[in-house]
Image: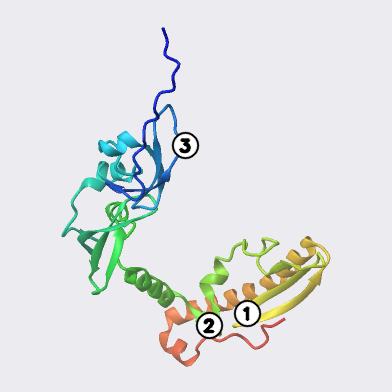
Amino acid sequence: MTDDRELPRRTVEDLTGRRFGRLTVIRQAETKNYRTRWVCRCDCGQEKVVASRDLKCGKVKSCGCLRRNVSGKNKKDITGRRFGRLTALYPTQHRDRHGVVCWMCRCDCGNQTEAAASSLLNGTCKSCGCLKKENQDKIQSRLHHVDGTCVEFLEKRKKRKDNKSGFRGVYQIKSGKYRVSIGFRGKRIYLGIYDTFDDAVESRLNAEKRLYGEFLERYHEWEKKSVKDPDWAKEHPFSTISDLKM
């Protein structure tokens, strides 16, 4: 015979504020399959819903980042190892957005910086940032600037994706028409406003042919002579020909 009397309800232990591994209990979640569950925040910033018994018995200690950190490359102790200009000093409490441990590193330049273990191991992080700056300075030193114009830039110019039209120097204005301009000798030259995109692009290309094309042609002619006769080059430094203008 079934006893229809109401059974006394089990008192739920309040776990709010308690820590279990990397998890801190925030609030009670909806009960599922007669199991009391809690919303927890992990030290890495992620939230996870965990059953009471899984927290208490230590089955779940993080949102999953702990498991990721102790697997594969991330479980290696890289103390004292060098990665480019960086020497790994010690692991910090910080994690990147993937939950990977960040290491405090000393750069050869003397600065200290944090870097994710994965970035060090796969070679994407090799310095505190000084290496990138030096490389950029080297690139700039190899470029040839004449009258405010970079020769290499003119030779490798491409379509632009940072304006509405998608073509360098061509910008669509509010009226729907297209404003065209071109940069040369450190200045911006206004070429006009056109009704159609094709007309605007044609105007821009004609200006490039007139300014950039002739500029490069004359520069390379001067460069050939300067290689053959450095003394002549010193006496005749290259400069933009005065008649090279719109």
Residue 174 seen from this side: yes
Which residue is rendered at x = 50% and y = 90% of the image?
Answer: 236
According to the picture, the residue beneath numbered tag 3 turns out to be 30
**Dot 3 amino acid type:** Glu
Closer to the observer: label 2 or label 3?
Answer: 3
Which is nearer the eye, 6 or 106? 6
Which residue is rendered at x = 54% and y = 71% of the image?
Answer: 153
Q: What distance separates the C-alpha of mark 1 from that of mark 2? A: 10 Å
Mark 1 near mark 2, Cβ–Cβ under 8 Å? Answer: no
According to the picture, the residue beneath numbered tag 2 turns out to be 146
Mark 2, secondary structure of its residue: strand
Q: What distance separates the C-alpha of mark 3 from that of mark 1? A: 66 Å
According to the picture, the residue beneath numbered tag 1 turns out to be 184
Closer to the observer: label 1 or label 2?
Answer: 1
Which badge, 3 or 1, is on the more N-terminal residue?
Answer: 3
Relative placement, left or right, of 20 versus 151 is left
With respect to residue 10, does 161 lie above or below? Answer: below
Quarter of the image with the C terminus is bottom right
Closer to the observer: label 3 or label 1?
Answer: 3
With respect to residue 49, does 147 lie above or below? Answer: below
Residue 126 seen from this side: no
Q: What distance separates the C-alpha of mark 2 from that of mark 3? A: 70 Å
Q: How many marks?
A: 3
The image position of residue 22, as x and y in percent, is 30, 48
Applied colour scheme? rainbow
Which is nearer the eye, 206 or 79? 79
Which badge, 2 or 3, is on the more N-terminal residue?
Answer: 3
Answer few, some or many: residues within 10 Å of disc 3's Cα (few below 14, many 20 plus, some between 14 and 19): few
Relative placement, left or right, of 47 versus 213 is left
